[in-house]
Image: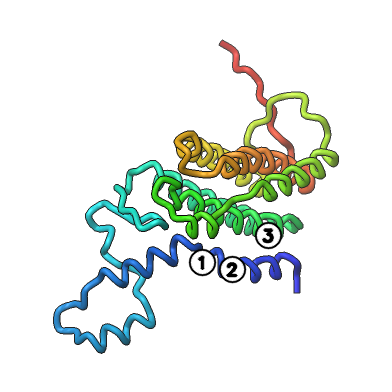
Amino acid sequence: MAAGALCARRCLGRIRTPPWAVWKARMSQDRAEPPKGVSPSSEKESRRFPKIYTKTGDKGFSSTFTGERRAKDDEIFQALGTLDELNSAVGLCAEFGEESGHTFMEELHRVQCVLQDAGANVATPVSSARESHLRRTTFSEQPVLELEAWIDRYTDQLPPLRAFILPSGGKSSATLHLTRAICRRAERCVVPLVKAGEADANVAKYLNRLSDYLFVLARHAAHKEGKKEMIYVRPDV
């Protein structure tokens, strides 16, 4: 079995059910009342297969991992939504990378798993968290160091960067550049939470390093495919 597939299987459960999502699903089931015409026994039976929709967010509020209800435009959910967008973009990069014969898919699957952990940390605001919450959602510096090792390895294989390059270099490279830009936005969403002491500083550090990794990986993809990187040239004025 390919290494990428093994990594995907190892982290698939975490990708589908991060701690804060599991907690939210349980809370939603506990709060929901049986629909009219449905007996309590049949409702209990249906809980074995929970529905995708819960209706608990219809009034514009959602729950954090700590059980706190906040408006959906709260900084926490802005950050969580952007992390979700980033994770989806990383998945797209992996698909394009596999189609083009690249070998970095296992790294991208690993990134997706770490982004789920980052989301769990963000969904656990320190101000309302119990010690048990914090233990389950801690975010260490180890993933940051892992990214730095990958960055150094790819950088050593690339020609020196002597000019500004534009997002280009084929589908894989351009998609990695787009994902890098989303990563920067995710970092900007997380920084206020770190400043407020609600999220771990290592989450912001990881996103900062991840954008660097995606930039280097985009260049690597272009060079491996023999695609030209477009150089910035100042337009005539």
Tag in front: 2 or 3: 2
Mark 2 and mark 1: span between their CA atoms? 6 Å
State the image quarter where residue 76 is shown.
top left
In the foreground, 204 or 170: 204
* Kind of residue at badge 1: Arg
Residue marked by disc 3: 99
* Kind of residue at badge 2: Leu
In the foreground, 184 or 178: 184
Mark 2 and mark 3: span between their CA atoms? 21 Å
Pick the quarter of the image with the N terminus: bottom right
Residue 180 in the image: x percent, y percent? Answer: 60, 41
Looking at the image, tell me whether mark 3 or mark 1 is earlier in sequence order.
Answer: 1
> Which residue corresponds to the image point at 54% horizontal and 44% vertical from the top-left?
200
> Which residue corresponds to the image point at 19% horizontal and 87% vertical from the top-left?
39
10 Å crowding of disc 3: few (<14), some (14-19), many (20+): few
Residue marked by disc 2: 12
10 Å crowding of disc 1: few (<14), some (14-19), many (20+): few
Marks 2 and 1: CB-CB under 8 Å? yes
Residue marked by disc 1: 16
> Which residue corresponds to the image point at 26% horizontal and 83% vertical from the top-left?
43
Establish if 164 lies above or below 99. Answer: above
10 Å crowding of disc 2: few (<14), some (14-19), many (20+): some
In the drawing, does residue 38 fall left or right of residue 47? Answer: left
Q: Which mark is residue 54?
A: none
* Kind of residue at badge 3: Glu
Residue 14 in the image: x percent, y percent? Answer: 56, 65
